[in-house]
Image (spheres, rainbow, N blue to C red):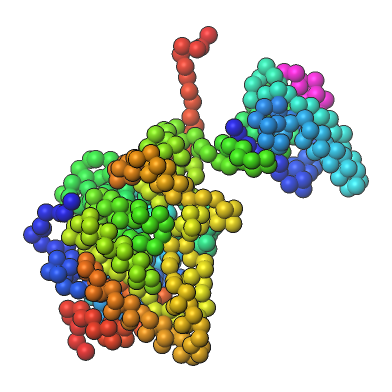
Amino acid sequence: MIVAEQKPLEEIKSMIADARKVLVLGCGTCVTVCFAGGEKEVSILASQLRMATRLDGQEKEIRELTVQRQCEYEYNELAADHVRDADMVISLACGIGVQTMNEQYPEKLTVPGLNTSGLSQPTEQGVWEERCQACGNCVLHLTGGLCPVARCAKSLLNGPCGGSQRGICEVYAERETPCVWDQIYHRLKDLGQLDKLLEIEPAKNWHTSRDGGQRKIVREDLRL
Amino acid sequence: MSEAPRPEPESQLARRLAAGQFVVTAELSPPRSAQLESVAQEVDVLRGYVDAANVTDNQAANVRMSSLAVSITLVQRGLEPVMQVTCRDRNRLAIQSDLLGASAYGIRNLLCLTGDHGKWGDHPAALNVWDMDSIHLLRMVRNMVDGPCYENGRPIPKVAPRLFIGGAANPFAPPYEYRPMRLAKKVAAGARFVQTQIIYNVGRFEEYMARVRDLGLHEAVHIIAGVAPIRSAGAARFMAENVAGMDVPQAIVERMAKTPRAAQPAEGVEICLEVIEQVRGVEGVAGIHITAINWAEIVPEIVRRAGLKPPTQQW
């Protein structure tokens, strides 16, 4: 799922410095599941902002609302009255939600309250680990089901560099992030597929990823 | 897997290796500023003692003068360069254009590397490129030389680059069992020589070489063993504990630690000479690569005392 983390309170305060009435708008989907932008987090942030702005002597009116899915117009329509009454909106959705709101309500600026930080798996309570970079050209069938594009610090496609110690990637050693190529090696060994590691993977076509410009899927079969 | 014999070796290094002569290379760090005096000084120190000098490419992800510019200077000053190229800072377009320029200026040896992560460098906020990895790079260069074609498959008109292509090999990074396979992959991609990670654990290196020989790789690629004199007990401990992919046995750390501080550089040289003596006897080792960062003046002493004999050597 998409995971995100709340921005520092000071940064959020500075973004809304010129507004008097502010709507904190949560999202009930991915960021609710990762405890970053659901109803509860909206309530906490709203309370913090009320207190902080009162202490600063510039108390703002902070409203709260959480829609089911901020990346779709029809859910955001339920926020229309709140948006109209506010000077500014703080979105506690991922970057998609923030942009949807700005597009849907161009007369009001919606600012990001979260930093969207990846497509991750919740591996234990309170821990999310990145698993996918949405590169647009999946290689998981070649690598034992472990993604080197997202999980190798260098996105290497032809095996491990020299930078692992006891199976831990040197780049993220303090986070104890495993070297994914060490994991791929052992996984392919267990599967009896080590021969796959001898094949030279061609240089990746990044056109399907960040370098083809903004990506867009059009499914004619689904269009109305 | 081995390359067809070539009519004319690309470089002196290639010629010496093809003739079965034991080679010596050393590392040369480009300056951190826009002046070439320090390069000229290092060239004067190394010339005559080594067959070629590696010119690093923003080593450890710190900004330095480009390996291309410094390699050209080496050519002009009569010391054969091994130009290093990493995939961290440049994409396939930038690398290919640099290689056309390198060849045009007479650079004939190229070392293809993945590159250290930018995290520890002096610009940790920079984008790490990694459009390609070292194996892609080896194959791209091989195709530029032999195709001759660009990475996109289109032919290179008129004059193709002439380069003797090498890579790195690290016997000391896990998974150890995979390391010989990775060497095989680099050879298949186009590596004709490799320089190894710095060797302190000779036992592990011998195990690695045994497997390399089982695969017949020692006959398909020239393997140059990496060594480095340790300058202090602190450096030994740091490498042992903090540098991934380095294997400094505890015995060496302790030996340095119990040496009086003033004698530690000399002890480091002694250890280096012992490693050279041990690895030069390992079947399949074609030469020695000496890394002495900020300590170029020690290279002639090591070469002399180890009895390594480059071709033009007059002393």
How far across and down, in percent of the image, does residue A55 sit?
A: 90, 47
Looking at the picture, tell me which residue is in the foreground, A211 or B278: B278
How far across and down, in percent of the image, does residue B243 sit?
A: 48, 65
Write the residue at 76% across / 22% down: A79
Give the side of residue B225 with respect to residue B238, left or right.
Answer: left
How far across and down, in percent of the image, does residue B65 sit?
A: 41, 66
How far across and down, in percent of the image, does residue B252 sit?
A: 44, 78
| Image: B8 above or below A199 | below
Magenta highlight range: A77-86
Give the side of residue B187 with respect to residue A103, left or right.
Answer: left
How many circles with numbers are drawn on the protein?
Answer: 0
Looking at the picture, tell me which residue is in the foreground, B167 or A214: B167
Looking at the picture, tell me which residue is in the foreground, B55 or A197: A197
Give the side of residue A170 with respect to residue B171, left or right.
Answer: right
In the image, is residue A48 part of the stretch drawn in magenta? no
Write the residue at 49% across / 58% down: A166
Residue B297 appears in view: no
Write the residue at 22% across / 60% down: B213
| Image: A105 above or below B138 | above
| Image: A223 above or below B74 | above
Which image quadrant is residue B291 in?
Answer: bottom left
Which image quadrant is residue B251 in?
Answer: bottom left
Give the dominant element type of the magenta stretch: helix, strand or loop. helix
Residue B172 appears in view: yes
Looking at the picture, tell me which residue is in the foreground, A30 or A13: A30
| Image: A6 above or below A220 | below
Q: Quadrant of the N terminus of chain A?
A: top right
Instruction: Find the residue positioned furthest to the top.
Output: A224
Which image quadrant is residue A118 in?
Answer: top right
Write the residue at 48% across / 70% down: B240
